[in-house]
Structure formats: structure tokens, C-alpha cells
Image (cartoon, helix red, strand yellow):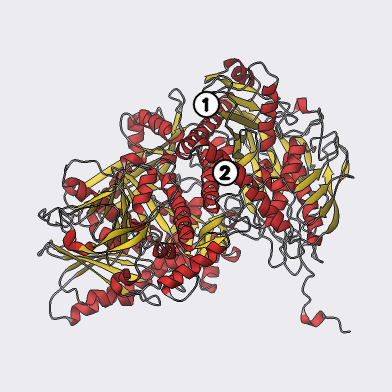
Amino acid sequence: MNSNSLRIGIDIGGTFTDFVVYDPRLQALRTFKLLTTAADPAEAVLKGLRDLCGNRRIVHGSTVATNALLERKGAQTALITTRGFRDVLQIGRQNRPALYDLFSDPSAPLVSQTWRMEITERVDYRGTVLTSLARDELTGLVQRLREGAIESVAVSLLFSFLHPEHEQHIARHLREAGFFTSVSHEILPEYREYERTSTTVVNAYVSPILDRYLAKVEAALNISRTGSEIEQTADLRIMQSNGGSIRTSEARQSGVRCIVSGPAGGVVGAFHVAQLAASLKNPEALVNIIAFDMGGTSTDVSLCKGAIKSTSEATLAGLPIRIPIIDIHTVGAGGGSIASIDAGGALRVGPQSAGADPGPACYGHSLLATVTDANVVLGRLPGEYFLDGKMILDEDRSRTALTAIGQLIELNAVQTAQGVIEVVNTHMERALRVISVERGYDPADFTLVSFGGASGLHAVELARRLGMPTVLISPFASTLSAFGMLIANTVKDYSLTVMLRGDVSESEIDKRFDPLVDKGLHEIREDGFASDNNITIERTLDVRYQGQSFELNVPFTHDFQRDFHDAHQRAYGYARPGAVTEIVNVRVKVTGHETPPHLPIKEMESQDPSPAWIENRNVVFEMTESVPFYQGECLRPGNRLSGPAIIIRSDTTILLDHGDTASVDGYHNLIIQVSPSRQGGLI
Amino acid sequence: MSQISYDPIRLEVFKYLFAGIAEEMGVVLRKSAYSPNIKERRDYSCALFNGAGAMISQAAHIPVHLGSMPLSVAAVIEHASHSTTGIAPGDIFILNDPFRGGTHLPDITLVTPVFISNTPDAAPYSFVANRAHHSDVGGMMPGSMPVAREIFQEGLIIPPIKLVSRGEVNQAVMDLILANVRTPEERRGDLFAQMAANGRGASRLLEMVSRYGSNMVNSYMQGLLQYTERMVRHSLQNLPKGVYHFTDYMDDDGLGHQHIPITVAVTINADSAVVDFTGSAPQQQGSVNAVYAITLSAVYYVFRCMVGLDIPNNSACLAPITVIAPERSIVNAMPPSPVAGGNVETSQRIVDVLLGALAQAAPTIVPAASQGTMNNVTIGGWDSRHDKPFAYYETIGGGMGARPDRDGADAVHSHMTNTLNTPAEALEYSYPLRIERYEIRAATGGLGHFKGGSGIRRDVRVLVDAQVSLLTERRLSAPYGLDGGQPGAPGENRLIRNGVEQPLPAKGTIYLNANDILSIRTPGGGGFGEQDQTPTTVPSS
């Protein structure tokens, strides 16, 4: 890549396709949004790229794979598995999704029984072949696949991660016959057959769809290149769920790695802006953040202690996907969540959402009382300022909707609105506690990085409830996912189940790591990272006490056993230093570091924010008060404000309560110092 | 009951806070436990109680523990009331006695009192408790799920006693327990995990008290009980008043007594119900007896499903419902009856009869019978690979009954359990066993306008000589269909030795040679509605 290339991050959301563009020659960042073209997402992407000429390095977060899975519009897929095990994909773990709902069923498998096919072979837990592969059965299988117009085939055999030869043979055969082939020991060489098979099948199901989409985008980019008079190149890359990007040629083979690329971009972006902000004071500072992205229908939260954290326990649409994914916890509550009174007389918020259509009452198309309406009634979201005045909120409708709900519990509209905020904040607080306190982290050690349209009105109160001292809101909070993609490194994950006793020699463990590291280095060099200076290799181990079933991931060092005991103590409140440990998986993460864009630091100006002041309006806290409103875009570095105050921006609205103070730093971040909790305060 | 008025907002807030405590306890237990039953299969429950022992919240883990957890706390309170050592801060009680707060012996419950005052005579402010199914608690068979004649054969009986006293582990108790079980290291690990789970629950509750104050927390514990009762009464009003009868049968008790009736009369009143099991069989010689706690849990489960609303799991769910279970009957057994299968098998049949009765009241929301068994299989012996004994316990899913508007699901656990399977690869790492087949048993669901779900076939090869305990049901009787739907296919147990199949009983102990295959084939669910006639066979009038 040319170091003068334009760098572009593109995130396709439900409503908008976001573009963030960095021009290294001008050292300038700009963002813009186009309406998403849902029927053909490539349309908006290509339209946005049309005006961005020259050499370009594009990282694209794609919802194509996600939507193919959620809408069940993937490729015609078959599965080949060990004889006797074709139904593992359907049986799953044999549990049902809801205990007390006689009408809820497990998610249907992506491959129907007709296309779950068996082949004679068997390998045991030591990797020993018990029954050799019946190669002669392959011809018949391929014949059936052809007749059934199957496009894509997943291959998942028992213990294939210990003896990949059988899968390799089948894959070779299928690839020669022209099928897209997804192979379990390549996608996820880890034990537990259902989870591995499920991940491999999801990959087979979504990859051909992603492949077609990328072929189209690449073709269009190439056409525009030949049609243009200026010589230009486009290096198109795809964002993965692990927070790093890969080449399109890899993404087209492993679509499952790109399933949650949008939210992953958000966390990468949040972590980076927090790092930049911290570096203003101390370049060595360890950055601990909780990313908080509250949207219309759901809220994503993610904890990063010094680094972005991955999980291998993800489930999407009821299907396990066990490749490393940025650890993001999602709850179904957001600005559009609907308030109601249940049969027992409690005020509920969600899980139903008004979405964008019909939307909250104040959008003018419904009388659904939502969280957004509650904020409107409390004066925190003034109708005429919403989205830069492009959309006027109907305050009367909000009041009518909340009055109707309130009558059922003998509260007026304002009291009901306060209740709605209280209840939705409880949902959010729970989500934040799940990823912090429940996992042994003290929220007081973390900064809440708030983004997403609905976050700003709730972030400071949530930080207060959790004892978090600081909230950070970036100037491009609403395009943080696309920004995260723009800055994303190239990241490759490798793993292998080894099942070793924890007290084996380090050289024994090294031996298991070596092939993974070699493979990673080879692949990252193919990606253009020639110098070892910008490549890092992380070796980690999944460890447990022998006899347990859940592992904790710790770095592979001389002290990994001690680190494991510490991690166990932190996670579960006890450790057993004398007990035998077991290394279940070895993991290697290879990162090729991109040079982050250089963002200039602005000079500090006056502390006085009054040039940004718009007017004072009535806002309800515990009682109604006159509160200053500021135009966020007019605040200058160095400005300081104290609560109560409301900051209006075109992408979000930020609420400061009594005692909270905020300042604008050299990157235009709003840094809010949160005043400590009021004892027992509920509203 | 006096109805104080509660703030509808705080009611909702506290509902989440209380539920969160129980859920977080569950995460700690599951992730740090040793027994495959706990960690892989999630056979455990966690709950929070007020100072009087009323259950305030329970994480939605296993229905069979629902009605029974409050009885564990009641047993601890009762024990402490006439013990000289009483209840003090830092104590943790342990119990598994089915006749004193337990359900069956492998389910070990730990109860921790939570104090907010340090004065010497202070009463507990609250209790937290968790129950987990341990892989072995001694007795005549590995896995402690035998077909026995009396409870003493089923394993070690632990009445409510202190495992931890004022913060110190009572080593004598611990040693006594570990000396009586086949896999003591695993037991020790599980008990640590259980203590840690209660510890987490207690500290979360104390944080809540310091944030909101003890009076407010206490008052909303009460408020949520009243709220839940209102919800249940409200939904009972939607059922037509009347008395509905149903009888179904257990196959056998494992000792030759067959066709054991369980009968129920459900009376629906304006906003309450009476569930009367009078007429059910007396307690049996074999291990199919349910203690009262199990029967309560089954009633609780069924009404919880009928309510159809998202309500907290607490003691008030049962407040509008009177349960009559005659003493010394199969639904309210007395010592020294063996009870291992009451929890896992009889509980399923109790659900079948309750749903059969309620189908008459609410035909549009009640499904046909599901597989009606948990297919309990325990395999034990000597693991020569690791030179130590092993005990593997598994329950196997089957067909779900067809619903009034759709087919039943294939190959899932239904009703009183929802435990996961052990992955074939995990099993082979841990035990000298090998899975040969794991598949859906085709066409075993009952036919009908909507079809019942199909059962499972799971074939396990033993690689060493081993003993097997089977506690299975619906091998003779079939899961019923409704509204003209056909019954599901009964299950079958088979031994495959040198390629030759032979039948095995529904319940009993079998000795296997190395390389034998145990093949368990689970029942299908019942169908719903008359099967559609093809146009050519429509009879002319």
C-alpha cells in the first residue's frame, strides 16, 4: 500500500452507510453518511466511493454475511460427517431455548436432514484411526450433491483436529468437483463436535454469499479504475469479528469470521479514541475502557482492560460460532424500547422496540411510549434540535403516550417518564455489570466510552451507578464503527486443542505452538507485512483445573500456572494452587500493525464555553430546573462546563447532572468527570 | 394478604436486581464446577430467599428444583431452631436428605445465611442457596442412581448440618463425606464451587442493601411476592372453571411392579386452583418414589407454563394453588423409600397427568405428551487409562409432544429437565467410553394433524468392563396424543454384544463386558389432531 493512499472505513448499518476517510497528505479525517441501500448494499458503498479518487485502502465492514445468516438466505449447503453423527447438527446440546414456554423451539439447523450425509471413518481421542476413510463412498456423495444443486459443503469429522488427513482428502475431492468447501480442522481445530460443526456449517452457508457480493464490489471498483483518467488502485479489505481486517480473498473463504464486523469496529474505534485521549496526559497510560453503544433497539457493551478482549463462546441466532470474536454483550434495550404496564402492575420497558418504523410516538407515526419519548417529556431531548433539525420530534405525542401509560399506575406523564428512564437504566446497568463486576473487574478502574445515538443521555448516570469516574464521548461518536475499521490492524487467529497436563515441559508446549506460529507468519507476510517490526505474535493457553469444563485464557509465559490461579481467583472467588491443571487449547494471534492516522492535537483555548451556549430550557431532574443547552459542535478545546447541562450534537445529545463536570480535550473529545453516586438514589 | 402499595417502577427495578443475583451465582457455579452434570449439563439451580425462607428469585436453570428449593431453606431453619449452635454469620449448611429439604441424594444443596447485623442474637436477613447434581454420592452403584429397595442403598444421606461454621470448614464433615463417595477429588472441587457461588450471591445482596437500605430491599422482596401472586391469579382467571381429571401410568418400579397409576383432579376456581393427587398409587418398593418437594416442583412447572407471562420465579407462584398429595403415596413418599427416580422420572409423569387434565380446560395451549422420561444412564467402573474409578451419568432427550398449532421438536429435553448432553469428544477424553451413533430416531413421533417430535438413538461402547444403571420410562406405555393424534413410539433399551442385539429392562443394573454397546432409543412425542386424510380417501357422506 502506498503511504499516501486514502484510508477509508465503511460500515453498513440498518439505516445509514457510514464513511470515514483519512487523507494522509492533509492529515485530515472526514466522515459522511449515505442512506443504506438494503436491497443491494453495494450500491451505497460504490456511490460513496465514487467521489473518493486516487489510491485507496478500504476496510469494509459487511453485514452481508450477518444478514445471510439472520434472514436464512445463505447458500444451498450440505454437510459431510462421520458415520453415525449426521444429526449432531440438529440435536445440538439437546436443550430447548426457553424453560417455561411450551411453544418455543430450538433454532432449525442450517442443513436439513436430507443434506446431512455420512461417510465411513472414525478417529479416536488420541488421533488414532479406528476405521480408515472409505474413499470409495465419495463418488456417490458427490453425485448426490450435484443432483441436489448443492453449492456449498461443510466437512466436519470427529477428532479431525488430531488427524486432519480424512477431512483433507474429502475437501480435495469436493474442491476439485467445484463445490465451495468449508472444513472443520481449518475453521476451528478445537474439540466439542457440535460447536465445531456448527461454526463450519455457518461458514459454508454464508461464504458463497459474501463471495458474490465482494466479486461485485471489486469488479465495480476495477471498472471505475479503467474508466478513470487518473491511475488509481483500490486495496479492499474486510473487517472481521475479531477486530482486525483480512484480504477479500481470505474473507471469501471464511465468511464466518466477518459475522459481527460492525460492532467489532465500534470497539476498536472506542479503544483507539480512548488511547489517544489518554496519551495527551501520559503516553504510557494503560487504557481501560468499557465501550457503551446504545442504539434504537439494542445496546452493545464491551470491556477492554489494557487491550481489546476476545471470546470464543459466541452464539448468533441460536447457533454457536466459536471462532474468536470481540467480547461484546448485547441487550435488547435501546431508545426505541416500548414501555408498558404488565398484569401485576409493574412498569416494563422492552423487550419490544418501536424500531425506526413506526418509531417512538414523537416520530409522529405511532403512540408507542418509548425511552426516547420519556427523554422528550423530561425536556432532555428537545424536539427541534433532533438530528440537526432534520427531523422534528412531536413533543405532544410523547406526552400523550406517556400519560396513557401513567394512568394505569396513577402517575402523571413526567413521573412515568422518570420511571421509564429508571427501568431502562437498570437494564443497561445489568449489562454493564455482567461484563465487569461479574467477571471480577471493578468498574471504578474503567472509563465509559459512549457512542451510538441514544447513549449520551444515559452514559453519565450509568457511570455514576457503577462508580466509574469518567465518561469519554468522541467527536465522531456516531461513525465510530467505520473509524474502527479505518484504523484496524490485520489480525489472524489460530488455535488447536492439545489436552496436555499443565505441568508438561515448556518445550513440549512450544512444540504445539510452532506450526501455528509458522503458519501465521507465512500468512501475515503474504498480506504485505515484510518487516518483523510491525508484526506481533501473542501466544496464549486455555487452561482449567483437570476435571473442569470451562477454560480461562492466559498468556503463555513461565508463570502461566500462577496467572491461571490468579485468573481463577478473580473470576470465581477461589483458586486451588495445589491442584493439577490442564491445557486444553493453544492459541496464537498474529497482528500486522497499521500506522494509525495522525490526528493533529488542537491548541487549548479559553475555559469559557459560553460561545457554544444556545439557550436555557426547563429539564426535569428530581424537579424541574432551568438548564443551559450548548451546541456540541461549537465547543472548543479547553472549554469546561458543569452540570446540570445538555449538549446537543447532530448525532447525539449528552446529559450532565448536578456535580458532573466536562472538558473538551485537544482531540475534541468530551471528557466528563462523574460526580459520585447519591446514596440510595433511584431516579 | 395485606396489599401494601408498591412503586411500580421500583418493583420492576428490584425484579431485575434479585434475578441478577441468582443468575450470577449460576455463572460462578457452572464455570468452576467439576462434575460434568454441573458444568456441561447444567444440572443445578441457584436462588435467593428472604429471612423467613420465602424464595424471592431463582435463576431459570432446572424446573425440577423450582418448588423444592424453599423446602431446603425451611429444613435449615427448622434444624437450627433446636440446635445449640443455631445460625451464625459465616455458616454454610449442607444437605441432601430427600425427607429433610432434599430431592434425591445426588442433589446436594448448600444454604448460606446472610446477616446485616453483627449483634450476637441477630437473625439472618436473607438466605442464598444452590443445589447441584453431583456425579456420585456413594451407595450401591457408581453414579448413585440405582434401582434400590431403600434409600440407604442409594448413597450417603446428609441431613442439614454445617459444612462451614463461622467461616471455618468443618473438616470432620468434609472428611466424612469424601470418605463415602467414589470420586472424592471431584466432590471437593464441586463443593468449593458451590461455596463460591453462595459467597458471590451473599456479597451481591449485601451490596444491594448498602445501596438501597435494608428496609427498602426487604420491602420489595415482599412486594415481588405479592406481585407474582397477582400475576398468577390473573392468569388463572382465563381458565374455564371446573374439575378436570386425568390418569397416566409409570411403566414399573424396577422390581417387577408394573403399570403404576398417577391420578389427578385439578379444580380451577375463580382465581385459584386445587391439585389433588388422591387415588395415585402407594409408595413403591423400587426407586420411583417422589418426595413432596418433587411433586410441588412439577405442579409449579406446569402452572408456570400455563401463566404464559414473564414472571419472577419465587415462592408466590404457588400461593394460589393448593396441592393435596396423600402421605405414603408415590407422589409423597416417606422414609425409608428409595427416591432416586422420583426426581427424574416420576416428576415427568406428574407433568403428563397435569397437562392431560389441563388440556380439557385449555385445549389451545396444551401440547400432547412429550417423551415423559429423562432416560437416566449411569456407567461406572475402573478407568485403566487413568487408574482410577469413573462414574458417568447422562440423561437423553427425546420427542416433544405436538402443539395445537405446530409439530413437536425432535430430540430435545422436555418439561422437568433441560440439561445438556456430554459432547462425544468430551466424553472420550474423560471416560473409557466411545459414542458409536448419536442420531434422531426416525418416525418415532406420533402421527396427527401435527406430528410429535422424534426421539434419539445414542449408542455407547464401553472400552472396559462396566456396570450400568438404567432408570428409564415410557418403554411400555406410550406418550399420549391429543385431539385424535396418535401416541409417540415408546423407547427401547438394547445391549449389542458381538453384533447381536438383546433387550434390556427399563430399569435395572446390567454388567457389561469391554466392547459391549449400550443402545438407548428414546420415545417420540404424541401427535396432535386427527391425521389429515388425502383427498382421495375422504369418505363421502
Q: Secondary structure at mark 1?
A: loop
In the rendered image, residue B405, in percent from the top left (x then y), is placed at 69, 68
In the rendered image, residue A450, in percent from the top left (x then y), is placed at 32, 54
Quarter of the C terminus of chain B within the rendering: bottom right
In the rendered image, residue A133, in percent from the top left (x then y), is placed at 52, 52
Q: Is residue B441 above or below residue B463?
A: below
Q: Chain of mark 2?
A: B
Q: Which residue is mark 2?
A: B220
**Frontmost residue, A112 versus B48:** B48
Residue B399 makes an appearance in the image: no
Q: Which residue is mark 1?
A: B117
Residue B164 appears left or right of A470? right
Q: CA distance from mark 2 to mark 1?
A: 19 Å
- Of the numbered discs 2 and 1, the one sitting upstream in the chain is 1
Q: Chain of mark 1?
A: B
Q: Is residue A230 above or below residue A620?
A: below
Q: Quadrant of residue A630?
A: bottom left
Residue B147 appears left or right of A203? right
Instruction: Please tell me if label 2 and label 1 are on a single chain.
Output: yes
Q: Quadrant of residue A230?
A: bottom left
Quarter of the N terminus of chain B within the rendering: top right
